Image: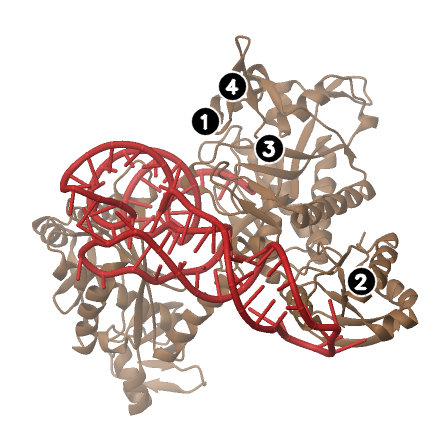
RNA sequence: GCCGCCGUAGCUCAGCUGGUAGAGCACUUCACUCGUAAUGAAGGGGUCCGGGGUUCGAGUCCCCGCGGCGGCUCCA
């Protein structure tokens, strides 16, 4: 057989040759370094036979993610081997490589609880297997053989997996991989032996439902990671450590922005500086919305249950609503603005000339989120959405959606934040015909293409009533969070009977677009802090400039400078503590205040300030008037 | 909500196998009045998350709550 190589050469090999044969034919060095090979888009064991005439590529430790996935998957098997030896009776389920490592899910025998205190013993056992250089041996067996094997071992999860493979894909054989004493049902591929795992570490233990189903067994998941070199592992752990310093839950209190209390789980206490930040974002949003034809409304916080019965939330969402009773009536605290906005719309008559009605409200919402899901500002029970509902005719939808997306990019561009767009399509529990979903998904895809946006399709992730476009960002540890959303809705207009009078003088059903672009100000601020490490844009940061008198006798001149700056719209503070200027500078630097104005004898006499820029140092002395103008330019809010 | 872990001064943390609580920073006072990342000294401050229990004795052990962290399910 003849297999082409990436460099254009073609290997001549006997029929039945394997990946290992190909690597050996290229050179002894590569034969040694080879981990697997890639052909037809798939990564395969070296021991597996090559396909004729298809280009191949040998995977080595320099093959990036492919190579790391291999040894991480290997390490997951080694972990399972160690755990089975140390904890007899444990049941194994699955253990794949993931973005930065791997995990393996176990069902430990009754009464056995694993914690990270057990990691050293498990890691030691794993290290024995790595050192022993145990080969990964693949064996293809019939379904019956595999079932017999795993039934005999009491490995119920494996039995279920095989039965599902038969039911869903009608397979007749499955592959098993053995390393040392351990055999697992596994699709592969694996590196030739455990020795290829250069450095590994177990990281955390967590619960995970079997097959992601909250109704089923909770398994114990052990997370870990592996690299080819100890140095790479150390660097990875160091990066994780540095990411912790950017955690908004740490930065918020440090910078005096917000804090949390156990007396109101899932709700931030916004401190003065954080409130300034929050209000600046709300103000920015108001200006940008006004420029784009939005109008703002204010709707109640609390509604009689009837509203949520009409909207359908009482049926589908009640467990997330804070409910209370008063004078024999049941009330709910609004978890979203849409029902209120629909009701507002329904209380008057609309002409097609009035549409689109772009109805905005920075609405305060409360949701009963399960305690285990709360996460700093990123997942809270009390938050403000930059919410708006666009009531329009169906033919206006594509333009409106496109305008929402453009608006979103205008916002995120101001912060140098990169969005990931997702088009979430029809879910299983949907309302409406296939024709409806084809049409509405098509409209959203059209708007995405019209704006030239790249996007991912999130199959089945749409709302039950219509598809949506979600705007995602990642936090300091790479976890993805949804910020904005643009959703079509034909369901609420139906439920609330929302109509407009058309040119034909007939009543037509209104279409509604839900959209939040920041998402929630809380989550947006959390993400922004993590992406900037607390170095907020100069126009946004709560304290833009701070005057630092060198000695107490300069306090008055410094206070004057602050007054002048404030009058010019710069958020300025005065540090009049009796401290050394070195100390004042240090504290201002740690607070990440962008501009420091040092005022001593020279400046007081000449009505000037010595300007120091955060992270840069002294940028020179200028007359106060010039400094105010210079600062005003640099701190002026956009839009 | 589920699984595991954690909860000591405002913050970051120490406190070995149970013997009655400590550091740095912050805060207060005094002295210093200072030129671009920490002036010095003294002092105040803790129902050791809450409630039960075991014990002569609990920050330390056990149980139950509450809260947080890492995941899972769910979600802006």
Quarter of the figure with residue A223: bottom left
Q: Residue at left 85%, top 55%?
A: A563
Rendering colour mode? by chain
- Count of numbered circles on the image: 4
> Along the polypeptide, which appears first: circle 4 or circle 1?
1
The answer, for residue A474, to whether it is visible in the render is no
Which marked residue is nearer to the observer: mark 2 or mark 3? Answer: 2
Residue B24: image x %, image y %?
A: 49, 66
Q: Which residue is mark 4?
A: A324
Instruction: State the residue lying farthest toward the top.
Output: A328
For label 3, count other residues whose C-alpha is less than 10 Å away and answer few (under 14), some (14-19) or many (20+): some
Which marked residue is nearer to the observer: mark 1 or mark 2? Answer: 2
Circles 4 and 3: CB atoms closer than 8 Å: no
Q: Is residue A589 left or right of residue A250?
A: right
Which mark is drawn over residue A555?
A: 2
Q: Which residue is mark 1?
A: A319
């Amino acid at each position: 057989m003849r297999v082409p190589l990436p460099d254009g050469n073609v290997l001549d090999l006997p029929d039945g040759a394997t990946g290992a044969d190909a690597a050996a034919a290229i050179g002894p060095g590569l034969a040694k370094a080879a981990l697997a090979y890639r052909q037809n888009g798939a990564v395969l064991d070296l021991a597996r036979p090559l396909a004729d005439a298809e280009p191949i590529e040998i995977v080595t430790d320099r093959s990036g993610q492919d190579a790391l996935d291999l040894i991480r998957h290997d390490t997951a098997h080694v972990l399972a081997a160690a755990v089975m030896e140390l904890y007899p009776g444990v049941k194994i389920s699955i253990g794949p490589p993931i973005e930065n490592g791997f995990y393996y899910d176990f069902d430990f025998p009754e009464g056995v609880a694993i914690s990270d205190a057990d990691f050293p013993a498990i890691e030691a056992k794993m290290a024995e297997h790595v050192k022993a250089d145990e080969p990964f041996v693949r064996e293809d067996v019939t379904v019956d053989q595999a079932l017999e094997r795993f039934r005999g071992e009491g490995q119920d999860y494996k039995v279920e997996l095989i039965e599902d493979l038969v039911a869903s894909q009608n397979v007749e054989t499955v592959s098993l991989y053995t390393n040392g004493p351990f055999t697992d049902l596994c699709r592969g591929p694996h590196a030739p032996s455990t020795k290829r795992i250069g450095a590994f570490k177990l990281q955390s233990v967590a619960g995970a439902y079997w097959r992601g189903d909250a109704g089923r067994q909770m398994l114990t998941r052990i997370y870990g990671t592996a690299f080819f070199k100890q140095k790479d592992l150390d660097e990875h752990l160091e990066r994780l450590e540095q990411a912790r310093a950017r955690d908004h839950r740490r930065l918020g209190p440090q910078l005096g922005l917000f804090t949390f209390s156990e007396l109101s789980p899932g709700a931030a206490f916004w401190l003065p500086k954080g409130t300034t930040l929050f209000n600046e974002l709300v103000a920015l949003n108001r200006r940008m919305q006004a420029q784009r034809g939005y109008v703002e409304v204010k709707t109640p916080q609390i509604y009689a249950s009837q509203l949520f019965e009409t909207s359908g939330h009482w049926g589908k969402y009640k467990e997330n609503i804070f409910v209370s009773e008063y004078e024999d009536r049941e009330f709910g605290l609004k978890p979203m603005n849409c029902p209120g906005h629909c009701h507002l719309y329904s209380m008057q008559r609309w002409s097609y000339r009035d549409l689109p009605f772009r109805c905005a409200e920075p609405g305060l919402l409360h949701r009963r989120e399960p305690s285990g899901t709360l996460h700093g500002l990123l997942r809270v029970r009390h938050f403000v959405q930059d919410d708006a509902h666009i009531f329009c005719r169906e033919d206006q939808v594509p333009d409106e959606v496109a305008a929402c997306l453009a608006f979103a990019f205008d916002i995120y561009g101001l912060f140098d934040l990169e969005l990931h767009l997702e088009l979430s399509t029809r879910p299983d529990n949907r309302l409406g015909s296939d024709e409806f979903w084809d049409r509405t998904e098509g409209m959203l895809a059209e708007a995405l293409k019209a704006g030239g946006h790249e996007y991912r399709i999130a199959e089945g992730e749409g709302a039950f009533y219509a598809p949506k476009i979600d705007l995602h960002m990642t936090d300091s540890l790479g976890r993805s969070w949804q910020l904005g959303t643009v959703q079509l809705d034909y369901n609420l207009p139906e439920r609330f009977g929302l109509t407009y009078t058309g040119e034909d003088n007939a009543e037509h059903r209104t279409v509604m677009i839900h959209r939040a672009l920041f998402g929630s100000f809380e989550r947006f601020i959390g993400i922004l802090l993590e992406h900037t490490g607390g170095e907020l844009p100069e126009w946004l940061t709560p304290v833009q400039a701070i005057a630092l008198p060198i000695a107490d006798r300069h306090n008055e001149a410094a206070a004057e400078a602050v007054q002048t700056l404030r009058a010019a719209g710069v958020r300025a503070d005065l540090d009049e503590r009796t401290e050394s200027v070195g100390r004042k500078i240090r504290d201002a630097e740690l607070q990440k205040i962008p501009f420091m104005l040092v005022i001593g004898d020279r400046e007081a006499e000449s009505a000037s300030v010595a300007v120091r820029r955060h992270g840069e140092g002294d940028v020179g002395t200028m007359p106060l008037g010039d400094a105010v103008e210079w600062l005003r330019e640099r701190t002026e809010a956009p839009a």
